[in-house]
Image: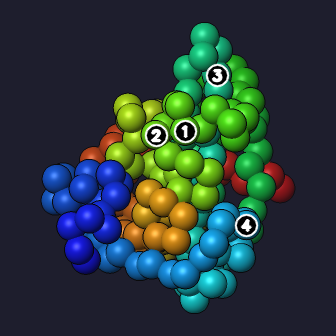
Amino acid sequence: MAKSAKTNAMRFLEAHGVAFTARTYACDAFVDGVTMAQKAQIPAERTFKTLVAVATAQRHVALAIPVAEALDLKKAAVAVGEKSLSLLPARELLAVTGYARGGCTVVGMKRQLVTAFDASALDFATIFLSGGRVGAFIEVDPRDIARVIGATFADLLLA
């Protein structure tokens, strides 16, 4: 991959010795995670979206769940040790993470947020995450990312 094509997420993984495969696909703008997985020809069940939530005192947390699933905010709050969470408005995403909608990922943010993955990530040797911009994915072992960012795994999905 050309040096200029690397994103902060990819640089972060390289700097921490995490093996990954970068994939790109043609797209004009973000639509939704399932559509993006289809465009990239990757399995939706192994493709995880990053959601950012706000806890008390404006503490932000990152949550990674399968693109076709919905987040249970109560389960997520328990997983990150908070009483309650609300989703960060999309217009605030860039300021908080350094990533635009559709390109947000759990690594390489402006500052590392407390992060939890849905436990289903452990069902796979590798998962796909946004690569740090619309049109890019990274394929990586979820255990490797969890190790370098201190993420946890928990049931985060709406039943």
Residue 62 left/right relative to 73: left
Q: Secondary structure at mark 2?
A: loop
Tag 1 near tag 4, CB within 8 Å:
no
Q: The disc labelled 2 sits on which kind of residue?
A: Gly
Q: Is residue 53 left or right of residue 68?
A: left
In x, y percent, where is residue 79?
59, 37
Q: Residues within 10 Å of mark 2 (few under 14, many from 20)?
A: some
Task: Pick out the residue farthest to the right.
Answer: 159
Q: Quadrant of the C terminus?
A: bottom right
**Distance from Cα at disc 3 to Cα at disc 1:** 18 Å
Viewer-closest of 145 and 2: 2
Point out residue 140 in the picture as x, y percentages from the top left corner: 37, 69
Task: Give how far across and how far down residue 80 sits, in percent.
Answer: 56, 32
**Which residue bears the numbered disc 4?**
31
Q: Which residue is mark 2?
A: 98
Q: For the residues labelled 3 and 1, say whether their Cβ atoms are less than 8 Å apart.
A: no
Provide the residue designation for mark 1.
94
Q: Earlier in the sequence, mark 4 or mark 2?
A: 4
Amino acid type at circle 4 is: Val
Identify the residue under disc 3. Answer: 55
